[in-house]
Image (cartoon, grey):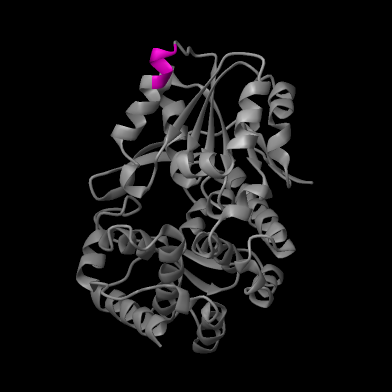
Amino acid sequence: MNNVFVDLKENSYDVIIKKNSFSSLNKELKERNLYGNILIVVDKSVNKTHSTKIEKFVKSHKGKIEKLILDINESKKSFETLNKIYDKLIKKNFGRDSLLIAVGGGIIGDICGYAAATYSRGIQFVQVPTTLLAAVDSSVGGKTGINFGSVKNIVGAFYQPELVLIDFNFFTSLKEREILCGLGEVIKYAFLSNNEFFLFVQANIKKLLKSSSAQINKAVYESVLFKAGVVASDEKESGLRKILNFGHTFAHAVEIEKKHQILHGEAVIIGMVAALYLSNEKGLLKESLLLTYLQLFDEVKDKIKIKGLDKKKIINAMKKDKKNRDGKIKFVLIKEIGNLILDVEADKKQINNALNNAIKFFKN
């Protein structure tokens, strides 16, 4: 078992990373005095595939417990879905001593986190990410929220979980596209962290596309360990934590332009390629390193359908990004592995060139 401790003083928590760890969830809750009134919110597709283990947990809990199953996707990351959680909590008389458990991907985790942050001015919650993407990205760090209109995650709060439990058994039912989405964030950490992890990801990229591989376990642990360190240094994203947005300014805009037909992890891969080209365009990244770094994407680029991207719409979407300041689009760019530059501005021509080059890269 590899545990990661997210050190945030009074908001600290463990990330348990272990195969079959969900079977010991009741024990983990009891050890942390979280064994009270529980609402467990489960993604419908996860409940269908893993109903036996989820029901076993529900039946083994000694206190009050209710289950809410949600049919979820990016378009339902909304007030309407949030209200379903509030409605269940209120109708079943859950008070401030309650615990919300999110079992699903990043959308379930984000919505449940925001519900926990706002219900009765804050109740405890636990994250059980069931996708590779959620495990290495949204489940750790305390970002919660929902979309509003066409703007991603514009309504939200920083609210840390009491525990994150990553059980690799959930990954066995993931399709290759879902693994690819998680791999997008793993690749991001490869750029952010160090040469050793970058070389590991580069050498094992094919194996990382298989959910049962031993390499997935290492990738999850190293990614969570890196993110935990960044979050511990900058919980509310006022400085260092901004590096986690590498590729995301482009990515969120691509998601919006394609109305989420391109999934988040896929968009992050596109966004990182565009960010690499923009880094080169801005004179930050040497041509030789650009070509080396782009090779990392050779095994995955054919799996991403990029047809019909409208650059004008992408740039317009970027103008609404919540990370912007003074009406200016801000980028996280790269000089070399582990050396990221924050809050870089670029003109329309530079952004256009980066997008053109990224689109050509995925079409070749």
x 74%, y 23%: residue: 31
Q: Nearer the viewer, residue 78 or 174?
A: 174
x 43%, y 18%: residue: 89
Q: Nearer the viewer, residue 238 or 226?
A: 226
Q: Position of residue 332 (x, y in %)?
A: 44, 64
Residue 8 showing in the rendered view = no
Q: Is residue 228 above or below residue 264?
A: above
Residue interval drawn in magenta: 88-92
Q: Quadrant of the C terminus?
A: bottom left
Dominant SS of magenta comes to: helix
Q: Is residue 28 above or below residue 37?
A: below
Q: Position of residue 170 (x, y in %)?
A: 62, 48
Q: Is residue 105 above or below residue 32?
A: below
Q: Position of residue 18 (x, y in %)?
A: 73, 46
x 64%, y 55%: residue: 226
Q: Nearer the viewer, residue 344 or 51?
A: 51
Name which quarter of the figure residue 338 lies in.
Answer: bottom right
Q: Nearer the viewer, residue 316 or 283?
A: 316
Question: In the rendered picture of this protein, how many numbered marks are placed on residues?
Answer: 0
Residue projecting furthest to the right: 1
Does the magenta portion include 173? no
Q: Position of residue 9 (x, y in %)?
A: 65, 32
